[in-house]
């Protein structure tokens, strides 16, 4: 039977939950960014940017939804190399430094973050690499060491951009893919211990003392609520004042320059403040549905590459969402991680919607019910 006959409708539940999250994101970006946008003399500045990114992301999602994901396997090496090269662009004159970090590339007509491109490029390449070596996954020499080199290079390219949180996010995602592929548990144990040691040295590095301050602030944010604990405390104030039903859409107080970048790294705090516990719970449930459908797709696809690719995409969304929620609820040290599909950010939104498009294409080849 040909692939044409095997293909069925894409997962509608996954598509609907994605579009609802993007729609909620547009509304909440507009609301949370209003004070900052007014300061830029254009109250609709961030709204216009988010709508443009959403339209572009929707077009990309439709394209990848109808683009046979098996072609990604064929071009995985090229995709990976190109994604790594985009990371090197930050060290050229095109590199743009904002807020003390050089993580953006300015193309003149637009800017983008290479780290988002590296994330999806790494997932595609690792999924292809592991699917070709399914009999050697447990081998230290043929499986673990080559896979660790891929993970190390990918994460290293992001770490040199001084983004520890994104580095950890990608490392956890790629490790999930490797684990699902069948890695040896003893190797996993050693890698987890090594990773924890590496993270400890990264946090205590004297050249990045701000990381240690974030850690101490996490332990007791109210002990220094006017300095290192400021963001965590203001986020908790926002969530706490929302109550069950929220203050009302557009009525947040913390977005008036109390929380830095409320439309990005702390957008969930504003959701909790304006829409209350019920609004925040709705957003969480939409992510649960999205992740659940993604897991179903990964479990029921016959093709190993499709399984690992779906696992990587779902893993990335899951890890990044959990880190964002943990940060805004002060369950982990403060760090800059946007909420997938919801936070303001052109590159992130387009890349995540493209990834969902790939997931939707994989769902067309799944045998089970998609309703």
Image (cartoon, rainbow, N blue to C red):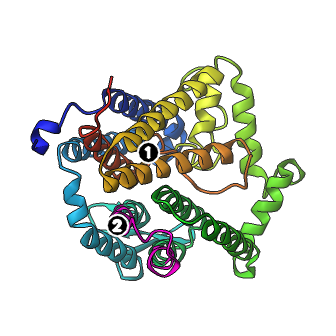
Extreme residue toward the right, this view: 223
Q: Measuring 69% from the left and 54% from the top, which residue is drawn there?
A: 334
Q: In this view of the protein, which residue sits in the foreground, 320 or 269?
A: 320
Q: Are marks 2 and 1 in contact (CB under 8 Å)?
A: no
Image quadrant holding the C terminus, namely top left
Residue 217 spot, x, y in % from top left? 81, 57
Would residue 23 appear left or right of 316 to someone viewing this image?
left
Q: In this view of the protein, which residue sits in the foreground, 33 or 17?
A: 17
Q: Which residue is mark 2?
A: 125
Secondary element type, mark 2: helix
Would residue 352 appear left or right of 245 to someone viewing this image?
left
Establish if 94 lies above or below 185.
Answer: below
Establish if 185 lies above or below 200.
Answer: above
Would residue 195 appear left or right of 249 to someone viewing this image?
right
Magenta residues, start to end: 124-148
Q: How far, Cα to Cα, is label 2 from label 1?
A: 44 Å
Would residue 188 appear left or right of 114 to someone viewing this image?
right
Q: Which residue is mark 1?
A: 41
Residue 149 is inside the magenta segment? no
Tag in front: 2 or 1: 2
Numbered circles on residues, count: 2
Residue 142 is inside the magenta segment? yes
Precedes in sequence: disc 2 or disc 1 = 1
Residue 330 spot, x, y in % from top left? 74, 46
Q: Measuring 83% from the left and 50% from the top, which residue is drawn there?
A: 221
Magenta portion: prevailing SS class: helix
Residue 219's image quarter?
bottom right
Q: In this view of the protein, which residue sits in the foreground, 85 or 128?
A: 128
Residue 359 in view in this figure: yes
Q: Residues within 10 Å of mark 1 (few under 14, many from 20)?
A: few
Residue 66 spot, x, y in % from top left? 17, 43
Extreme residue toward the front, this view: 135
């Amino acid at each position: 039977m040909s692939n044409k006959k095997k293909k069925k409708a894409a997962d509608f539940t996954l598509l609907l939950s994605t579009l609802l999250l993007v729609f909620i994101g547009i509304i909440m970006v507009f609301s949370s960014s209003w004070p900052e946008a007014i300061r830029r003399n254009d109250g609709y500045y961030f709204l216009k940017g988010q709508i443009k990114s959403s339209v572009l992301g929707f077009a990309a999602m439709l394209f990848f939804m109808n683009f046979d994901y098996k072609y990604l396997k064929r071009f995985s090496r090229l995709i990976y190399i190109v994604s790594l090269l985009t990371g090197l662009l930050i060290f050229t004159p095109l590199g743009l430094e904002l807020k003390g970090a050089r993580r953006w590339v300015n193309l003149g007509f637009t800017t983008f973050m290479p780290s988002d491109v590296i994330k999806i490029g790494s997932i595609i390449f690792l999924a292809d690499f592991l699917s070709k070596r399914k009999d050697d996954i447990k081998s230290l020499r043929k499986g673990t060491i080559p896979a660790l080199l891929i993970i190390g290079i990918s994460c290293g390219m992001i770490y040199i951009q001084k983004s520890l949180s994104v580095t950890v996010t990608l490392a956890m995602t790629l490790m999930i893919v490797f684990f699902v592929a069948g890695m040896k548990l003893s190797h996993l144990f050693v890698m987890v211990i090594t990773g924890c040691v590496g993270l400890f040295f990264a946090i205590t590095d004297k050249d990045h003392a701000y990381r240690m301050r974030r850690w101490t602030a996490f332990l007791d944010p109210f002990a220094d609520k006017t300095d290192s604990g400021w963001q965590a405390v203001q986020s908790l104030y926002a969530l706490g004042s929302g109550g069950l039903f929220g203050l009302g859409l557009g009525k947040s107080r913390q977005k008036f320059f109390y929380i830095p970048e409320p439309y990005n790294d702390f957008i969930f705090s504003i959701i909790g403040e304006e829409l209350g516990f019920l609004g925040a719970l709705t957003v969480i449930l939409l992510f649960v549905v999205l992740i659940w459908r993604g897991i179903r797709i990964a479990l029921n696809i016959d093709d190993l590459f499709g399984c690992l690719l779906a696992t990587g995409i779902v893993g990335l969304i899951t890890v990044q969402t959990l880190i964002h929620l943990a940060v805004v609820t002060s369950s982990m040290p403060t760090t800059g991680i946007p909420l997938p599909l919801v936070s303001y950010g052109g590159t992130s939104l387009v890349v995540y919607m493209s990834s969902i498009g790939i997931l939707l294409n994989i769902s067309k080849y799944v045998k089970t019910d998609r309703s």
